[in-house]
Amino acid sequence: MKKLVTLATLLQLGTASASVVAVMDTGTDISHKDLAPKAWTNKNEKEGSTTDLDGSGLPGDIHGWDFTENSAKVFNDKYNYLVNDDVKKFYTLYAKYETKTINATEFDWLKKAVENKAFMNQANFVGSYAHGTHVGGIAALNNPKAQVMSLKILPTVYQEYVAPEKREPVQLEFDFAPAITFDQFKEEVQKTAMSQVEEMIPLNGYLKFHKVDVVNQSFGIGFEQAVGFLHSGFVEAIKREPTQDELLEVLQIYYGTLLAVGPEMFKAAPDTLFVVAAGNDNSNNDALPDYPASIPAANKISVAATLGYSEIADFSNYGQKTVDVAAPGVAIQSTGPAQSYLHMSGTSQAAPFVTSAISLAKDINPALKAADIKNIILKTVDVKSWLKDKVTTSGIVNKARVQRAAELSKTMNVEVAITKARAEIADVATPKSFAKRLPGMNIKYRPLRPSLLVKMPAL
């Protein structure tokens, strides 16, 4: 019979060193009481220094860096006032909607909120603004020794909602630039794809410099997004609508380039494990690629989202070949700005669950290499029939089993440790019956994932 080993017991096993966990996102509020004790501190730099003391290329990078504003201040709290009670209520009730536990009164409030464009403008912004802090809290969960490095690569700028009838008339700007040819546009598309990868390489080089063990990347460009910006780019550059064949050709060039050169950005930090959110479009990444989730790399894990250990999330991307594992990503409570706690859903929340498991394994056995830990993560999952053809492993990450395998690997071969951990640690229990929403309880909203369609300053 399998022994039930609790997380609390496993946390006491072994002598843990401190794993470095980077969160590449919208900024992590390390002043939060749950994150402050876990903030990574660069002992080779001085706060406020205008001189680069450690040779990383960034002066005064005590807790990480804000690449969007070129600043050592890793989180800008100027928008904390937007995290108000109604916004918190929205995310709480949406969590109940996702878990099918919402009642009629709560649903009426939620439905009205979703239909209120001004409110949703604020709520969606908070979802982005709080994103890095929420992800950071999940990544460091149950690991008091983890050191969280905040790397802000996605800007957060709030714009008040203005109703259409109150907006200033648009001043027409005539574009007298001559149209370029289709061949020239294809060259520009290829350059764009290459620049997206090239911009990430020095950021990932920063991870290598500081010996980061695992980095969470809950962002990306979905296939629908790519179609949108390539279509608009075509119209702007060539001054006409593309044919279906032309749009397909530029998509093939764009993704072909990303898939060809994309692995280079992961090679920039070969000893770091990259955990990447699969996307929230409910689409197959094998057929419709997602960036960077679909980029092949030995030191990368792509993550789908599930509702607990019961079913795949209705918004989650999937892919038997390109998505490695699944993890809980629905109605996850974690840290938010202004000492708040928020419930959020998305593959953005599933990814840091895996990041947390990796950091725990590294702290239990610091001798484990990135490849060893990835092997443990993939081979200790709870296999689910409903994940067959959805993720490569057909399974959900089992944290307790990961930790047990890490502990056993201190005295035996990793493969043997995995086998023994599978024998000792039971699958996570799942409910015998599932809740159901009342008829008519449907809203048009899906979790947002921060986009990479932003030009970043050079490192």
Image (spheres, rainbow, N blue to C red):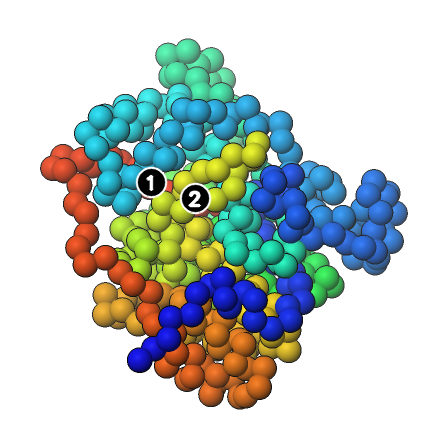
Q: Residue at 82%, 48% (x, y): give it.
A: 59
Question: For mark 2, does the 10 Å Cα neighbourhood hold few (<14), some (14 to 19), or many (20 or more) residues?
Answer: some
Q: How far apart are marks 1 and 2 (CA)?
A: 9 Å
Based on the displayed image, in which of its 4 quarters is residue 457 positioned? top right
Q: Taking 99 as reference, is 249 above or below it?
A: below
Identify which residue, 177 or 59, lies in the foreground.
59
Q: Are marks 1 and 2 in contact (CB under 8 Å)?
A: yes
Amino acid type at image mark 1:
Ala
Q: Is residue 395 left or right of residue 358?
A: left
Q: Taking 397 as reference, is 41 above or below it?
A: above
Based on the displayed image, in which of its 4 quarters is residue 231 positioned? top left
Residue 36 seen in this snapshot: yes
Identify which residue, 321 or 182, lies in the foreground.
321
The x and y percentages for residue 65 are 70, 47
SS class of the residue under badge 2?
A: strand
Residue to which mark 2 is pinned: 333
**Lower position in the chain sequence, tag 1 or tag 2:** 1
Q: Residue at 38%, 17% (x, y): give it.
A: 164
Question: For mark 1, does the 10 Å Cα neighbourhood hold few (<14), some (14 to 19), or many (20 or more) residues?
Answer: many
Amino acid type at image mark 2:
Gln
Q: In this view, does 319 lie to the left or right of 132?
A: left
User: Which quadrant of the rendered structure holds the N terminus?
Assistant: bottom left
SS class of the residue under badge 1?
A: helix
Residue to which mark 1 is pinned: 95
Q: Residue at 52%, 56% (x, y): give it.
A: 142
The x and y percentages for residue 272 are 61, 67
Q: Residue at 52%, 42% (x, y): give it.
A: 335
